[in-house]
Image (tube, rainbow, N blue to C red):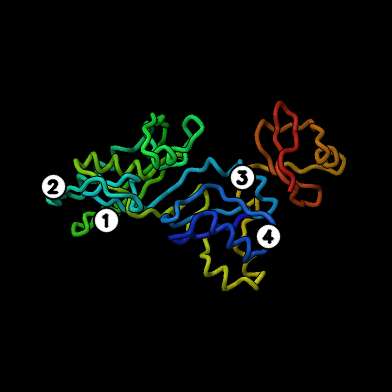
Amino acid sequence: MNGVIVVDKPKGYTSHDVVAKVKRILQVHKIGHTGTLDPNATGVLPLLLDNATKVSKYLIEHDKTYEVVLQLGIRTDTLDGEGNILEQQIVDWNNYSEGEIEVVLKSFLGTHWQTPPMYSAIKVKGKKLYEYARKGQNVEIPAREITIYDIHLIKVDAIEKQITFQVACSKGTYIRSLCEEIAKQLNTIGYMKELRRTKVGNFSLENAVSLEELEQHAEDSLWIKTKILTVEQVLKDYPTIQLEEKKMHHFLNGVKISVSQPDGVYHIKDEKENYIGLGIVENKKLKRDVIL
């Protein structure tokens, strides 16, 4: 069962929990994912099944889109609802209009440097940041370059003092840090209350299935097949090279083949249009990369 299935991860599950459950339901040998979601986050979690795990390197750099609920007036040590409250402020909603909030959000568009949260799995000097945080140790956190492609206001809740917005961003963007930065620009404090990932690259909620749906259709192989995307579908932007039998034999044995195509990644098919895998062309030479 080679391919990719997109799961709508429920709240309270770790990405590992989802992998284990889907592995049991689909009875596949191997499953990998292309980017973790925190237990309290929900949404798009692409899972690579069996031999499709070999193409993970082509999927981990994808941009992402989130729907976020920012709670104003409260700051936590983890920058989300799981942490301890460090500070609270009164939020006077009369100080904000939707237009002014939108202006603040738009100020984050483009490329800039972001400092990841202390409670994160980024390693500094061989240890994960949250290990330092749990011991109360201070460590210098290196900033990283991120890009915000789009960000806009969805709604405001004056009673709960919450802002809901959508953001499309580059890999490596910490939405918890972004929420803290937005609250600061609004002259208050805040934390990320809710996070829902709505898109990862070309994967979106529109082609995602819930764990409940998978459970219900566990015996329906035809239904499950309609939910699994092939590697060729997932990497649809790459062109194709078709090889005749002799060249295919050399290709499969790791021999570089002379071709006329420009440098890049290519889907490889045989004479009968059977999908073989991926190859890379460099200086007019095709070499084997991933065989499925």
The picture places residue 116, in percent across and down from the top left corner, at 39, 37
Q: What amino acid is found at the position of numbered circle 3 in the picture? A: Ser
Q: Amino acid at mark 2?
A: Asn
x, y (%) of residue 201? 51, 47
**Pair 1/2: label in front:** 2
Residue 148 seen in the figure: no
**What is the secondary structure assignment of the residue under circle 2?**
helix
Mark 3 vs 4: CB contact within 8 A: no
For residue 28, the mark is: 4
Residue labelled with disc 1: 155
Label 4 crowd (10 A; few <14 / some 14-19 / many >=20)? few
**Residues under labels 3 and 1: Cα distance?**
36 Å
Q: Is residue 3 above or below residue 150?
A: below
Q: Secondary structure at mark 1?
A: strand
Closer-to-camera residue (120/213): 120
Mark linked to residue 95: 2
Task: Give the crowd class for mark 2: few <14, some 14-19, many >=20 residues within 10 Å.
Answer: few
Q: Residue furthest right?
A: 246
SS label for mark 3: helix
Dot 4 amino acid type: Val
Identify residue for label 3.
56
- Determine contact: label 1, label 4, CB under 8 Å: no
Separation of marks 1 and 2 at Cα, in angstroms: 16 Å
- What is the x, y in percent for residue 234? 60, 50
Q: Secondary structure at mark 4?
A: loop
Seen in the picture, residue 52 relative to 124 is either above or below; the reply is below
Query: In front of the other: label 3 or label 1?
Result: 3
Which of discs 3 and 4 lies nearer the camera? The answer is: 4
Which one is nearer the viewer's eye here, 75 or 31? 75
* Left or right: 226 in relation to 72: right
Which of marks 4 and 3 precedes in the sequence? 4
